[in-house]
Structure formats: C-alpha cells, structure tokens
Image (cartoon, grey):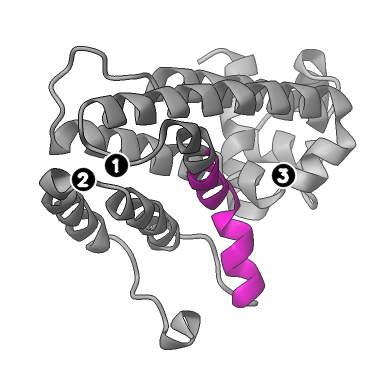
C-alpha cells in the first residue's frame, strides 16, 4: 500500500478507535510507524487527512445506494441495502460521532458533506419510489422523500441519540444494529400487506446482531 493510502486508512482506524479531538498528527505518525515529516509530506494537517477519508466515504455511498432497476426484488437484495447502511455508519463511525465539530472546523468539507447528503437523499428517494412502484411500500408519492430523509436522520444521528441517553455507552456493532432495526420499523409500517412478512424476516435477521433495548428506553 502506498504511504499516502496507509496514512488515510491508518488514520481512519485510529479515529474510529479514539475519536478525532485528542488525536494529533504526531499520534497518527506514531501509530503508523512513520516520521511526522513524512506524514506532512503527504498531508498539511489533520483536516487534510479527514478530507481524504471523506473521499472514501463518498465512494462508499455512491457504490452502495443505487436503485435496483431490473434486479429481482427479494430478501437478499434488501439485506444488501441494509448491510450497506450499517457498514457505512460502522466504517466511518468517527465522522458520525463527531460530525458537528468536524464540519464546524472545515467549511470546505461542510459544503462537500451537504452536497453528498443531497445526492444520497436523491438516491434513497429513488429506491423508495421504486419500492412503491413495485407494490412493496404503501405511501403517497409526496411523502417518499420525507420518509427517506427520516430514515437517513435515524441512521446518521443514532450514535448521538444513544450516547445522550447512556453516558458511558461505547459504539459497538450491536449498538448500531439497534438503529438499523428502527429504520426497518419504518419500512414495515409502510409496507403493503403482501410484503409485511418479508420485513418481519428482515427484522428477525438483524435482531440477532442487536442488543435488546432496555425497558427504560421504551417508556
């Protein structure tokens, strides 16, 4: 792997493990076993590294959320969408966990993020419109985009929501699967009778990976 790529992927690993705020470029260089000078040869500062990580984030979104077009709709296809949703949040969890601070420090990245999210919302809306046209979802056309946006908000801000309700809860895969199940609840609530059983199967599939919700969270 090229040195620049090692820095990007190594920084992503370290940010996910320890967060962004307390990680300096010296920490990153030590973690990678390179000199600070070599790191600065490739990147001006920590924000520059985060922008390159954001490139990976954009590629991940673009590859994973495309309408299924002529592919046959089945459980495996839907699992592919939901797995992509989970993998995006998990792989780039430091961004979701520190999003406001990261964007406030970097106006250029903030503009890119807003543009990327608009495109992601358009693609998600197109997928939901296709599901509606194929008789999977029962929803008025003018409510498709707000529903897609609501699902995006749950996925994007689930980490913040959980951490404000449990002071010491760390971000685990099971933690994120709970959020995915909340998105599935919305799908099931809008599904047609013919596809209700399919979404029930999806819930059962992902429930195996999620921790049980505490009783207090249901009050």
Q: CA distance from mark 2 to mark 3?
A: 36 Å
Q: CA distance from mark 1 to mark 3?
A: 33 Å
In this rendering, position of residue 195 left or right of residue 87: left
Residues packed near mark 2 inside 10 Å, few (<14), some (14 to 19) or many (20 plus): some
Please give the range of residues in magenta.
149-166
The residue at 53%/26% (across/down) is 120
Mark 2 in CB contact with mark 1 (< 8 angstroms):
yes
Q: Where residue 165 sits: x, y (%)?
A: 61, 75
Q: Which mark is residue 138?
A: 1
Inspect the magenta stretch and tell me whether residue 162 lies in it: yes
Instruction: Compare marks 2 and 1 and give the one earlier in the sequence.
Output: 1
Q: Which mark is residue 94?
A: none
Please tell me in which quadrant of the rendered image residue 77 appears. top left
Look at the numbered disc 2 and give the secondary structure of its residue.
Answer: loop
Q: Which marked residue is nearer to the observer: mark 2 or mark 3?
A: 2
Please tell me in which quadrant of the rendered image residue 67 appears. top left
Q: Which residue is mark 2?
A: 192
Mark 2 in CB contact with mark 3 (< 8 angstroms):
no
The residue at 48%/45% (across/down) is 151
Q: Where residue 50 sits: x, y (%)?
A: 72, 30
Instruction: Compare marks 2 and 3 and give the one earlier in the sequence.
Output: 3
In this view of the protein, which residue sits in the foreground, 10 or 210?
210
Mark 1 in CB contact with mark 3 (< 8 angstroms):
no
Q: Which residue is mark 3?
A: 99
In this rendering, position of residue 211 left or right of residue 14: left
The residue at 58%/52% (across/down) is 17
Look at the numbered disc 3 and give the secondary structure of its residue.
Answer: helix
Q: CA distance from mark 2 to mark 1?
A: 5 Å
In this rendering, position of residue 172 left or right of residue 200: right
């Amino acid at each position: 792997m090229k040195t620049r790529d090692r820095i990007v992927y190594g920084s992503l690993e370290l940010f996910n493990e320890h967060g962004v705020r307390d990680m300096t470029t010296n920490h990153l260089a030590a973690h990678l076993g390179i000199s600070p000078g070599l790191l600065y040869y490739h990147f001006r500062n920590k924000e520059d590294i985060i922008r390159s990580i954001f490139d990976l984030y954009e590629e991940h979104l673009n590859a994973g959320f495309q309408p299924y077009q002529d592919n046959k709709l089945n459980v495996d296809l839907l699992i592919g969408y939901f797995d992509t949703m989970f993998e995006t949040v998990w792989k780039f969890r430091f961004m979701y966990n520190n999003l406001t601070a990261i964007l406030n420090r970097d106006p250029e990245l903030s503009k890119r993020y807003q543009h990327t999210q608009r495109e992601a919302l358009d693609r998600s809306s197109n997928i939901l419109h296709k599901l509606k046209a194929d008789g999977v979802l029962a929803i008025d056309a003018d409510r498709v985009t707000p529903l897609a946006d609501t699902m995006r908000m749950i996925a994007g801000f689930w980490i913040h929501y959980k951490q404000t309700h449990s002071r010491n809860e760390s971000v685990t895969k099971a933690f994120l699967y709970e959020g995915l199940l909340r998105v599935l609840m919305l799908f099931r609530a809008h599904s047609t009778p013919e596809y209700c059983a399919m979404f029930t199967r999806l819930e059962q599939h992902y429930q195996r990976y999620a921790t049980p919700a505490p009783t207090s969270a249901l009050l």
